Amino acid sequence: QSALTQPPSVSGSPGQSVTISCTGASSDVGSYNRVSWYQQSPGTAPKLMIYEVSNRPSGVPDRFSGSKSGNTASLTISGLQAEDEAEYFCSSYTSSSTWVFGGGTKLTVL
Amino acid sequence: VQLVQSGAEVKKPGASVKVSCKASGYNFTIYALHWVRQAPGQSLEYMGWINTAIGITKYSQKFQGRVTITRDTSASIVYMELSSLRSEDTAVYYCARTAQWVFDYWGQGTLVTVSS
């Protein structure tokens, strides 16, 4: 199972919006709405930000949103804040009954 | 909900390591538990999971034959054993719970260092 493809880095100024893409295959992202997104700061465990493509757990600001089209899922962060600077990973359930993660995207708030 | 993992390990190439993950605060057998690793400066890498109710496991193809995930339901603990260690296995190993296909809770991570 190949890792999902994410851009290595994105950046934006406070208040702006950024979108992180996550491209998989018909055996994972394309077949299931079981895509989730995680935020990870250095030295800490990942934190769930979006599940089932576009749902936010309680406590996650509504500035975070998700979508999917075909084999590509996307995470959009609007109204960027300094605290959003972190690494973001996507994940998808696969047809092999396992999961796969993306390569990670480092978000820099300028 | 808490997932508390065992402490850091240092192993020699060719050895095996067994990491534990103790769950508390919920009904252990209702949720699957998974293992995910992260090499220094690298992305998350999925290893496999266990159905904690019936003990069935499923492993990522990359680790098939080298990883074994087991559980002790009486103690609410899941174990991950990785054999034939090599330097590339140096990583932080996380256990994580899934609820509805989502990793909702994570352990604190266990650093495994493989070095001669």
Image: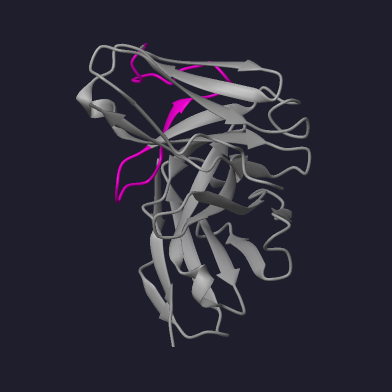
What is the magenta segment's predominant secondary structure?
A: loop
Q: Residue B88 location, x and y as percent? A: 52, 70
In this view, the residue in front, A49 or A88, is A88
Residue A20's place in the image compared with A101, above or below, is: above
- Tell me if I can see residue A35 in this picture: yes
Q: Residue B39 location, x and y as percent? A: 45, 60
Residue at 63 percent of width and 43 percent of height: A100
Whether the magenta-drawn stretch holds residue A72 is answered as no
In this view, the residue in front, A6 or A57, is A6
Residue A32 occupies quadrant: top right
Residue at 47 percent of width and 40 percent of height: A104
- Tell me if I can see residue A52 in this picture: no
Residue A52's place in the image compared with B116, above or below, is: above
Q: Residue A8 location, x and y as percent? A: 45, 39
Quadrant (top left/top right/bottom left/bottom right) for the N terminus of chain B? top left
Magenta segment, which residues? A40-62
Residue A25's place in the image compared with B62, above or below, is: above
| Position of residue B71 in the picture relative to residue A75 (left or right) | right
Residue A95 occupies quadrant: top right
| Position of residue A61 in the picture relative to residue A34 (left or right) | left
Q: Residue B2 location, x and y as percent? A: 38, 45
